[in-house]
Amino acid sequence: MSVEVLPAEGLLSASWLLIALPLAGAAVLLLGGRRTDRWGHLLGTATVVTAFVLAVACTAQLAGLDERSADVELFTFISAGELDVTAGLLYDPLSAVFVLLITGVGSLIHVYSIGYMAHDPARRRFFAYLNLFVAAMLLLVLGNSFVALYVGWEGVGLASYLLIAFWYTRPAAATAAKKAFIMNRVGDVGLALAIFVMFAQLGTTSYAGVFGSVGTLAGGTITAIGLLLLLGACGKSGQFPLQAWLPDAMEGPTPVSALIHAATMVTAGVYLIARSAPIYDLTPTARAVVLAIGALTLLIGAVAGCAFDDIKKVLAYSTVSQIGYMFLAVGLGPAGYVAGLAHLLAHGFFKAGLFLGAGSVMHAMDDSVDMRRFGGLARKLPITFVTFGLGYLALIGFPFLSGYFTKDAIIEAALDRGDGWGWVLGGIAVLGAGLTAFYMTRLMLMTFFGRARWADGVHPHESPTVMTVPMIVLAVGSVGAGALLVSVFPLSGWLEPVFGEPEEAAHVVAPALVGLVVTVVMLLGVLVAWLFVGRREVPVTAPARVSVVTRAARNALYADAVNESLFMRPGQWLTRALVWFDNRGVDGAVNGLAAGLGGSSSRLGRVQTGFVRSYALGMLGGAVVVAGALLAVTAG
Amino acid sequence: MTPDAEVVVSTGEAVVFWVLGPVALAGALGMVFSRSAVHSALWLVNTMLALGVFYVVQSAPFLGAVQIIVYTGAIMILFLFVLMLVGRDSSDSVVETLRGQRVAAAVLGVGFAGLVGAGIARATQDLPVAATSAAQAERNIPAIAELLFTRYLLAFEVTSALLITAAVGAMVLAHVEREPGSRQSQKELSRARFLTSDRPQTPSGPGVYARANSVAAPALLPDGRADGSTVATGVEPQEVEQMPRPTGREQLGNPDAALGTLDGTPSGTPGGRAGGEHR
Amino acid sequence: MTLSYYLVLAAILFTIGAVGVLVRRNAIVVFMCVELMLNSVNLTLVTFARATGTVDGQIMAFFVMVVAAAEVVVGLAIIMSIYRTRRSASVDDANLLKY
């Protein structure tokens, strides 16, 4: 369904400003240093807000175009022999959707951060990094080639590292940032290899070039490309097996968790797979692997989220699980793309809202994250409670809020496959919905309801306006986005230039029935949570004697342990062995050589006896050797 | 080289070679193995003379003459001069100070001679002898002169400069800087002689006898004693058999008694131990 | 007897001179051995001059003699001045250039 991409004109040709503005903001704030401390946060927010306004204008213009795809060519990136990489932007419906999400949610979070980081002396640096992230993420979604995507990919990885370790003097934060970066790197290798294969086989890495000619490759090669791209997506989106970094990334400030690890960066993987739809169309194997990864991660995230007491970690595992949903959706093929992207947008709203709410709670509770020390906050933090509650309802799929529409769309698409796998996947998705309801209700109950279990000296108070306004806006989005996207302004229509005509498949199960079943399951989850958590007294310290399942869930299904034993320990042994080899072997060889040279040199030095006659003897000896050699040569 | 050119030399030349060749070899070996440095120099003179004859035999009369006149006559004499000044009393001890030097030198020497000799012998087996007529032999010097002053003129001039440099260099090296005034004038010398020594007159030389006339024979003082100082340092004064002096009556009488032929008492062998030394 | 006999004789004389340089300790005798080596070379040159029928070899031998003369002059002057300061003419006494 390749649509003719026309060169951009008018406002769209200035779409490079979308990237340039935040980038310039980051540059000014980083290079300006302490001089910009007083107004740095304002500049940072202004650039992103301006970018949002420009994005709205560009999208409006795009909507008016017939073909609704605009190619903005920028400059020649690399020109070396046969390799001619032009850097350019592709502003089409898919990228427009992401741009609006990034700049919109990004602006709200920038405004929120003005208040959240008000007492932090390094606030300017925070905004610089946030701007850098926004610029890189925009490049990722706007680039018109895989190489441009990769540049943005690396940029967001860097910004994520810088932001997780924002309070770098804390060892836990530094370690978490390293972990995130390294696991991202593993995924990045996959993406890089995919780009290498593309270039080697097709000679081009631009979307138009690759998608146009990928059909000429052998099936195995296409599958390899698909799997490598998937590896990259897993790294960036925190899917199995590279999901362990996302919960640890909660060490960063909460706005970072909201923007990067809920709404935007972790969705880059979904974007990659959605953008590479033409490739996955040709390789059912890779698509099936995407499905499997999505389903598996969905369950892992949901199970792990049930057992944590850290509010941010629960939300992080929830993100992992929800992105599993998105992977599941895009793995279903053309039927699921739109559903997955709709869920992505809705999730961006409500998860960001939930994180901002969590930040507000932390702000009130003296930066504590232990839910066992919360309780009864509904009265003290009303606005937070309402916005958080709306986000919660959207997440669990309460009827007619955004999550309801989007999650059901995914389950319907799964069931519409028709074969046995469709039932399995649908069942897994429904089970995941139930678990989601359980752990989110547990979170709500432990935080906002019940008896106050606050620590001494904690006086919860509502957050300032600069923090609550973005939360309110996001709550509104959480409520309405689903209906908007699925029914009022159908996303499927908007994304038609990218994914083609929406197929009117015969539904295996009637949508109304699906909706009913999912709602029932959701209510069941809520009930179970109320029974186990709401009715009983919440212990202040976590109980030690728990079932095997709970212990497994507390350890995030032993993902860290597996990583350590599979990769970290062998890595350490390898390092130790190499160090030993370097010290004994290499150093020994070098020092031994030096010692040998020194020894032989001093022994040889004794030849210098000082006697002229000895030297003359040597000369005569040499003359004999030369004469002998000459005779041997001429005689032989 | 024409294949039928002369290779074998004339018989006369062969005879000369086989006579003087061993002589030259003996001279070389004698030079290397004799203990006294002066002996070595003389053995080398021997070898050089033999080589001079070789040059003449090989139709190089000019070079042969130059060898004898310049090389032997000038250079070796210079060697002897310096030996007298410097090395006469410093003869090598037989003991070799460097371990294994003699053995190694012998082995290498034999090896080198064998290798090079055998190689040369094999390579130059058929070296032709250029036929030289009598006219060509006569024209040896003009031929040399012609080449010397045309093709080798530069070398000629350069070597002459070299000779000048060598002479100047030798002068510089041998010069002993004396402080002005350190050399005593004649006046001071004679004053010193008369004031300090007890023999201010010119010392006399060795004595002249009827039976002995050598540098080892001491002169006689007025009272008949032999004066050891009249003999050069390093030379043992010899007991010279002297004629009896007719100083009184007891000297006159039987000539046999005077001559000592009656009783057959030996009056000292003329020459004695030191006799073999005077040459 | 051919001309190669002269050449072999010259080679043997050369070797004897070389061995003499190694074995003798008196500086002047060493010098004389060097002179012997030069003489053997002269013999070789003259022999080859005869073989080729030209006088170039003789002229080279002539130059060798001239240079040998200059060399002897300077060398003996050096030995003399060394003897004056060190009171010894043995080559083994100049052995300070050692490890």
Image (cartoon, grey):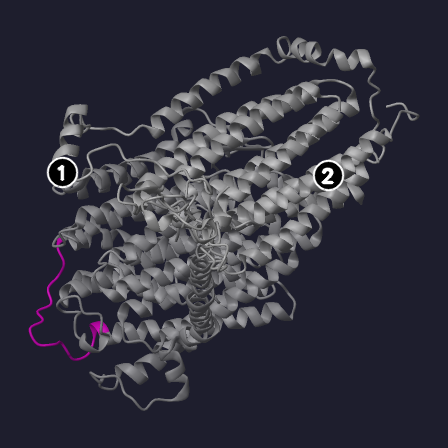
What amino acid is labelled 2 in the image? Gly
Work out whether residue B4 or residue A452 is closer to the camera in this orientation and state it. Answer: B4
Q: Do the residues labelled 1 and 2 touch (CB within 8 Å)?
A: no
The magenta stretch is A447-464
Mark found first going from the N terminus, 1 or 2: 2
Image coordinates for residue A314, horizontal then vertical, percent: 32, 70
Label placed on residue B21: 2
Mark 2 secondary-structure assignment: helix
How crowded pointer 1 is (Cα within 10 Å; few <14, some 14-19, many 20+) is rated as few
CA gap between label 1 and label 2 equals 60 Å
Residue A150 vs residue A474: left or right? right
Mark 1 secondary-structure assignment: helix
Work out whether residue A407 or residue A561 is closer to the camera in this orientation and state it. Answer: A561
In the rendered structure, the residue with mark 2 lies on which chain? B
Image coordinates for residue A284, horizontal then vertical, percent: 65, 58
Residue under label 1, please give it: B196
Image coordinates for residue A431, horizontal then vertical, percent: 47, 74
What amino acid is labelled 1 in the image? Thr
Res. C84 image quadrant: top left
Work out whether residue A296 or residue A194 is closer to the camera in this orientation and state it. Answer: A194
